[in-house]
Amino acid sequence: MATLSLPQSSYIRDNSRTFTEWLKSWLLTVDHKRIAILYLLSINFFFLLGGLAATLVRVELITPQGDLMSSDVYNRAFTLHGVIMVFFFLIPSIPAVLGNFLVPLMIGARDLAFPRLNLLSWYLYMIGGLFALIAAVFGGVDTGWTFYTPFSSTYSNSNVVMTITGAFIMGFSSILTGLNFIVTIHKMRAPGLTWFRLPLFIWANYATSIIQILATPVLGIALLLVVVERLWGVGIYDPALGGDPLLFQHLFWFYSHPAVYIMILPAMGVISELISTFSRKRIFGYEFIAFSSIAIAILGFLVWGHHMFVSSQSVYAGLIFSFITMLVAIPSAIKVFNWTATLYKGSISYRTPMLYALGFIGLFVIGGLTGIFLGVTAVDLHVTDTYFVVAHFHYVMVGGTIMAYLGGIHFWWPKMTGRMYNETWGSIAALIIFVGFNMTFFPQFILGYLGMPRRYHVYPPEFQVLHVMSTAGASILAIGFIVPLIYLGISLRKGRIAGDNPWGATGLEWKTSSPPPTYNFDKTPIVTEEAYAYPPEAAERDAASWRPGSPL
Amino acid sequence: MRDFPLFPDQASTFATQVDQLYFFLVALSLIFAGVLPFVILYLIVRYHRSQKVDRSNPVNSNLKLELTWTIIPLILVMLVFFWGAFLYVQIRTPPMRTLDVYVIGKQWMWHVQHPNGKRENNELHVPIGQPVKLIMTSQDVIHSFYIPAFRVKQDVLPGRYTVMWFQATKPGEYHLFCAEYCGTEHSLMIGRVVALPLADYERWLATPGPVILPDGSIDTGRPTVVASPGDPMAAAGAQLFTNLGCAGCHAMAGGGVGPSLKGLYGATEKLNDGSTVTADENYLRESILNPNAKIVAGYAPVMPSYQGQISEDQLNQLIAYIKSLADTGN
């Protein structure tokens, strides 16, 4: 099956003769695959930067005193961590990298509907990132990634405007990507590829795109108004100027809660692909998983007030938001149960991407269940704004999104690069990340219930043991993130040639060569079957062909 | 275990109730998070590709199964929702008769004034067995008043009052944290809550001490703290009421340019646009700072605004005075 060399022509190769020509061929490309690679590099750069800020935070918290840095530096460190990780890593991660690469391939299209717009999205992302970086270098920003008013609009003496401008510009990148995906999925599916034959990754990205288009403008408006108040003293949020500080929270969370689903929905799409492939089975409950994505996207717009149970929002509003929040648990649970049921009577292999998928389920279950704790009003009063919340959203965002992002990178790496990586190291890294992650964030649930508030630079000494445990876990987690950089880097030169379909997966992206040609498909594929069309005896055959020495 | 606690103190009537719900949620979570991983583990071992087991007739969908795992979680989350909702309403609804304590938050300290005029900074003394209501506002950014041992937290906003109540059950000293990020020294905006038996609390209240004003300065001139039940906060408010000229229009006997304030607090006021409003702390505050926002039926919008002319501290005293005129005052 595996060919001995990479294909003669692919989207990576080109005939540029000089370095400038080569650079131009990348920076002015309109090929969705090349743009995906640009995103991959830039997003991972921001991830390392955000990780660096997290390291500063965790090291400072080893002792209860503020000995490593001043409170102003600490406040800038956690703000930088939050802003970078949320706006420049988590939100674009899976859609911009994997989505960009895979949406056209999975639906048998030549490219996205608007290739130039796609390139513009990347440039907007980079310009936004540049603003955020300049703000960080020239003094930083200390508002937290939530930019709560009137602190951000009136009181903070840091680079609020610059950072907000960065997030504002990046928002347009997000909107344009969403728009591009929606049009592409509607108009450019290969003949025969009906909605219910689409891979679940496409459904998930479709749901995500809807949120990106509808919610991001509200964030843009909210942030713009902060700038207006800050620069010109127009009273919008600051009561001293006649504004309302809660208005900002309403507008901000109207975007930022759905933003959580911008992060997790594509992740769930990735997991559906991985579980099905490595069980050699059609996914269980396809329609239920597909519609649960849409349900999460819609309900996600109606729960922003659950961030504001103690904000002085009315009791009745709190109850309604709590009620709808409970409903979000249902589609999330449906997905987890369907993934589990897919394993039944499958032929399961423990390849690296599958390890990430299984890790995702474990961490997402904990993240989701603690979300119910926070959605229950009476318990939320105690744990909101404590480390309980910090632990919960890291379980969902890191345990969920990053596990799926890494799982997806490992799954489609042979398609993107044409080469395989070292699977032993792959499995080891996945295991290190899983263990390190739990060691970092599980103690924070206990800290939170004890009452340790978040964003504290100095804390009462009785919390130290748990903080030290958390920092120890974070060190392990950091190693887990560095190992893949090494073996994936090595694989680019030395990796075994992967061939078109190293995993024996279904899906159109595996029907073209690895790496795919610029035009994706020689002939427009015609789809005659459903997604994950493993024949009923696929699992049996796979297991029968297993010999000692075959991959586990 | 003092140095390495795993569970917080339970020191208010809410603490045990919130913890019961919390433990129920933990138990519920263990059913899923404790069982599901083992199901997955069993499946991935049993159906690993090296295992020769029956894989015939795989199923790809099953409506009954889907309904089961939709409806059972739905019932369970509704159960915890209603449990939490009833408790939430209780925590957010102060009883009629409470001990009112006024809190002002500012970067980066808490200032507290008790009804008898006693002030304290970054400390809050409360009696046990008594419902205590905190009437809180901020001079600058948003803060949040958080007492983990009582399981209560409430954001403190500039430009309005927020209210939180609790009833302490166990004498002791507990953490007081600011839970909403408020700038440079957010993590130093902490203090302690001292819960005392009622007699000790009253003795503490009557102990003359330095009068610490919200700006941190110490006022040695005025003996604000008195042992008698003379209610100096209200008395200070009455003094202000006269000095600011309020009494000129708000004649207590009625018939003035403005409505009488006797029996106003807690009553339902009819407005000139036909709507009604309950005269709570926030209504009184708005009517002093922005008098034209709500006009009582039968009166003209002629009152000048006191925005910027009185401090939060004085506003609290005025409101304490107006509350002392209520029919069912405490």
Image (cartoon, grey):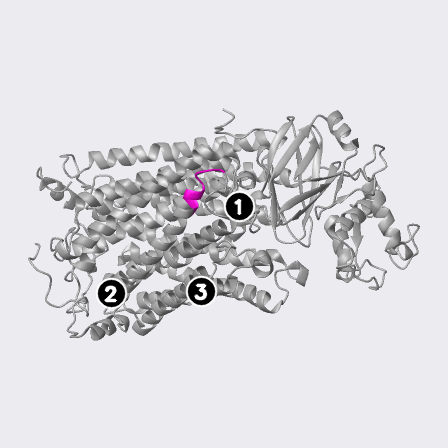
Residue A42 showing in the rendered view: yes
**Can you tell which mark lies on residue A166?**
3
Q: Secondary structure at mark 1?
A: helix
Drawn side of residue A131 relative to residue A490, left or right: right
Image quadrant occupied by the C terminus of chain A: top left
Label 3, label 1: how far apart the Cα atoms are: 32 Å
Kind of residue at badge 2: Lys
Of labels 3 and 2, the one closer to you:
3
Letter of the chain that mark 1 sits on in the rendering: A
Label 3, label 2: how far apart the Cα atoms are: 25 Å
Q: Going 86% across and 51% down the picture, which residue do you hit?
A: B241
Q: Which residue is mark 1?
A: A322
Tell me residue B55's x, y (percent): 17, 38
Drawn side of residue A155 relative to residue A144, left or right: right
**Can you tell which mark lies on residue A308?**
none
Kind of residue at badge 3: Gly
Q: Secondary structure at mark 3?
A: helix
Label 2, label 1: how far apart the Cα atoms are: 42 Å
Q: Is residue A282 above or below residue A195?
A: above
Q: Going 69% across and 39% down the picture, which residue do you hit?
A: B94
Of labels 3 and 1, the one closer to you:
3
Nearer the observer, B287 or B137: B137
Q: Secondary structure at mark 2?
A: helix
Q: Which residues are magenta?
A: A57-64
